[in-house]
Amino acid sequence: MTVAGPEVDLLRALVETPSTSGNEHEAVSFTARYMKDLGFRVHVDEVGNVHGSVGDPTAFEVLMLGHIDTVPGEVPIRREGNVLYGRGTVDAKGPLAAMICAADRISRAETPICVTVIGAVGEEADSPGARHLLGRPTPGALIIGEPSGTNAVGIGYKGVFRFRVRFVRPAAHTSSGQETAVEAASAFWSLVRERVDKRRNSPLFDCLQPSLVRLTGDLETAEAEISCRVPTTFAPAAFITMLDEIAGEDEVDVLEFVPAVRTSRGNPVAKALSAQIRSRGEKPVVKLKLGTSDWNVVGAQWPVPTAAYGPGDSKLCHTDDEHVDLTDYLASIDVLTGALLRMSEAMERPLVTVSDDHDKKGGHIT
């Protein structure tokens, strides 16, 4: 059966509105108008994030944080049966549209919570949108809008530590046998990888994963840029000490550090999402993600019950085949709505995190 309705129309309209990082204005304006027409309290903040809220503004707030920007690259927008192709269908306009639709449904129910949806700008860049949000009040609970799959809940994201090393060597003839700058850069990368590989005896989510992302240079000057996916146990100071030891006189510059985040499957948001998935006759799966998201940016300052959820296969993110199954997208709206209702009912009781020893064994890694 071909699915249709305003929820599908919203997603298609969002996908049809280009919004690469730094160029989100048109999509933000569309989303603001759409939420305002639904009766949301809407505003666009100083950096361009679009906010829409329903319910009592003084009540316990559940914040659903998605992002409205996409990576560059055109994916022809088309529909084949119940599959919608286009840039952003998965990452992450599908999750954002699902959150807007779920909040709209909640607005028509008498619930003792405030639900806010934010479409943040720049998540695919350096997250200026999420960083700006750190100046707002801390929500009571947080759902991150990222593709987990309709029957899965995200409970962690690895962090990132990115650095650059500059190498300078005196001019010399190639016949001299003297180490060139680009050879020094290559040797440095080999030593870093060797040191890290010796530590790799843990599950993948708990490992440090370095990648050489850029290597340029010649005989006299060279630069190596390395990006590491880091676990929650990562100690940046100790790692920098190791890098300085390997680099010697060469200069190490830290470009970025975003810590990893991880929660328990027993936290109230993850529990509500999982319970709603289970109520649909499906078996919920928890996932630990090897990439990063805006959760990494806000997590330390907002130590509240959190989980990531949204339709789509994250393996399709940034690819030329990005697409989402619309039946799964609609199912995700049902899951989000049910989870919000469950959290609303729980407002009569304290929100507490239930310990779950299974979390120590890890989750499904993607």
Image (tube, helix red, strand yellow):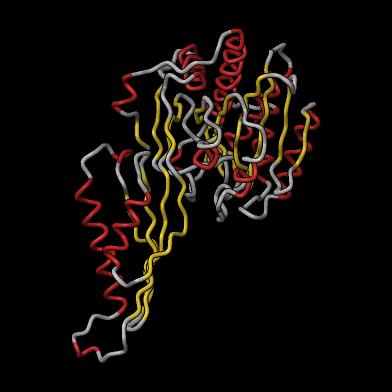
**Along the viewing direction, whichever of 225 and 20 lies nearer the viewer:** 225
**Along the viewing direction, whichever of 179 and 318 lies nearer the viewer:** 179
> In the picture provided, is 363 more to the left or to the right than 122?
left
For the N terminus, which image quadrant? top right
> In the picture provided, is 236 more to the left or to the right than 305?
left
- Name which residue lies at 34% across and 28% down: 363
Q: Quadrant of residue 213?
A: bottom left
Where is residue 24 shown, x and y percent of the image? 68, 50
Where is residue 306 shown, x and y percent of the image? 51, 27
**Along the viewing direction, whichever of 293 and 82 lies nearer the viewer:** 293
Where is residue 304 shown, x and y percent of the image? 53, 27
Q: How many marks?
A: 0
- Name which residue lies at 55% across and 52% down: 126
Where is residue 293 shown, x and y percent of the image? 50, 42
Please tell me whether residue 235 is drawn above or below residue 82 in the rendered image: below
- Name which residue lies at 42% across and 15% down: 354
Please tell me whether residue 167 is drawn above or below residue 243 in the rendered image: below
For the C terminus, which image quadrant? top left
> In the picture provided, is 347 more to the left or to the right than 199?
right
- Name which residue lies at 40% across and 17% down: 283
Q: Quadrant of residue 362?
A: top left
Q: Residue furthest top?
A: 348
